[in-house]
Image (cartoon, rainbow, N blue to C red):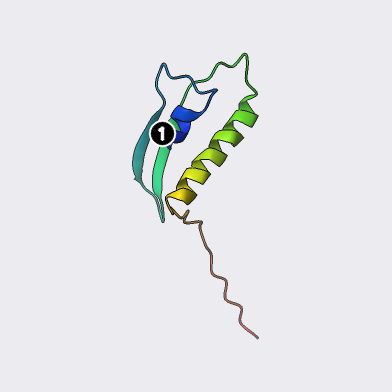
């Protein structure tokens, strides 16, 4: 994640981007990323989408799977 943030052209390098491991979720590792941008030259929603895509690309390259929450539903006949 940190590499993707550092490589992105619109993420400021000072202050440096940071990634923190916050803890364990129900079926996840909770990670939080902080980065700074120049708000005057960037559309924030477009930038977040670009960064999320780059992070997902890095995860896929590293064969990291995202554990999406699953719910099992059982139906019974009356």
Which residue is the site of mark 1?
2
Eyeballing the image, is 30 above or below 50? Answer: below
| Mark 1 crowd level (few <14, some 14–19, many ≥20, 10 Å Cα) | some
The residue lying toward the viewer, choosing from 27 and 54, is 54
- Quarter of the figure that contains the C terminus: bottom right
**Which residue lies at the image location 38% right of the left edge and 33% below the top edge?**
19
- Quarter of the figure that contains the N terminus: top left
| Residue 11 percent coordinates (x, y) | 50, 23
Eyeballing the image, is 35 above or below 62? Answer: above
| Residue 29 percent coordinates (x, y) | 38, 48
Q: How many marks?
A: 1
* Residue 49 position by quadrant: top right
**Which residue lies at the image location 53% right of the left edge and 20% below the top edge?**
37
Eyeballing the image, is 23 above or below 7? Answer: below
| Residue 18 percent coordinates (x, y) | 39, 28
* Residue 48 position by quadrant: top right
The residue lying toward the viewer, choosing from 3 and 76, is 3
Secondary structure under badge 1?
helix
**Which residue lies at the image location 48% right of the left edge and 53% below the top edge?**
66
The residue lying toward the viewer, choosing from 36 and 61, is 61
Kindly give the residue lying farthest to the top in the view shown: 40
Eyeballing the image, is 20 above or below 58? Answer: above
**Which residue lies at the image location 64% right of the left edge and 85% below the top edge?**
77
| Residue 64 percent coordinates (x, y) | 43, 53
């Amino acid at each position: 994640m940190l590499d993707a943030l550092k490589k992105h052209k619109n993420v400021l390098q000072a202050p440096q981007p940071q990634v923190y491991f916050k803890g364990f979720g129900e079926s996840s590792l909770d990670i939080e990323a902080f980065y700074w941008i120049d708000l005057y030259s960037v559309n924030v929603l477009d930038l977040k989408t670009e960064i999320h895509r780059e992070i997902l690309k890095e995860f896929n390259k590293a064969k990291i799977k995202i554990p999406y929450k699953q719910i099992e539903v059982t139906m019974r006949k009356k």
